[in-house]
Amino acid sequence: MKLIKNLPTRMINGRIESYGIFWCDGCKQEVEKPLSAGKKCKSCGCNKIKHGEIHTKLYRVWSNMKNRCSNSKHPAYKNYGGRGITICNEWLEFIPFRDWALSNGYQESLEIDRIDNNGNYEPSNCRFITAKENCQNQRTTKLSLKIAIEIITLYRTREYTQQDLSIKYGVSQKQISRIIRKERWV
């Protein structure tokens, strides 16, 4: 930023602060800032807000998708980035993702889904579906009706606990419980 004009000093929180008017090349506007900050900054902060959609649901969808795949501290990372699921280079920026989403059926009531659950987030492998459809596509629900009936039958023999069945079929105990209560396959 380029200093255009010095302004009088001000008292801010008990400190005397010198201000100035700076020209921001990013947004092509005059900006008032403390001299100490204005001389160090390259822009007024306009470069941090590229699209003005940071508070939209679609931005949250994109941001959550990126975090699941790249932030090892994200609770779902082990099921995404931890399994090698990545995001195509094009979608690392919001605008290309937004444009694809709006051209491919995005609505606020829908969720993003990977057609191949072992595939990456990329245009050829993604679509928007309802929350109910998305729940049925999770790896934990990829059991056939035949296997679900088998689980229920084994559980009723009282020879297997939910935990035993969880280990035997490689799904969570919570999923076994849902099957036994017939919440998924009725």
Image (cartoon, rainbow, N blue to C red):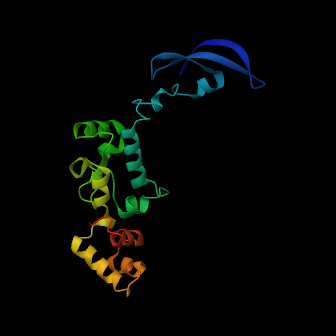
- On the image, which quarter does residue 82 sit in? bottom left
Q: Residue at x 29, y 39 (%)?
A: 107
Going 36% across and 64% down the picture, which residue do you hit?
Answer: 83
Instruction: Provide residue 30's location: percent of width, then percent of height.
Output: 52, 15
Between residue 99 and residue 152, name the one nearer to us: 152
Give the residue displayed 41% in from the left and 48% down from the top: 64
Q: Nearer the viewer, residue 94 or 154?
A: 154
Image coordinates for residue 109, horizontal then vertical, percent = 32, 42
Instruction: Judge left or right: residue 3 versus residue 71.
Output: right
Above or below, 83 against 102 in this view is below
Kindly tell me whether residue 18 is visible in this rendering.
yes
Q: In the orientation shown, which residue stands out farthest toward the bottom?
A: 159
What is the tally of numbered marks visible in this picture?
0
The answer to whether residue 88 is seen in the rendering is no
Image quarter in which the C terminus is found: bottom left
Q: Is residue 28 above or below residue 94?
A: above
Q: Indicate the position of residue 69 as horizontal and vertical percent values.
A: 39, 54
Is 28 rendered above or below residue 154?
above
Q: Is residue 103 left or right of residue 4?
A: left
The answer to whether residue 125 is above or below residue 167 is: above
Of 42 and 143, the residue lying toward us: 143
- Quadrant for residue 36, please give it: top right
Q: Residue at x 32, y 44 (%)?
A: 91
Q: Position of residue 120 (x, y in %)?
A: 29, 55
Image quadrant assignment for residue 31: top right
Q: Is residue 176 left or right of residue 99?
A: right
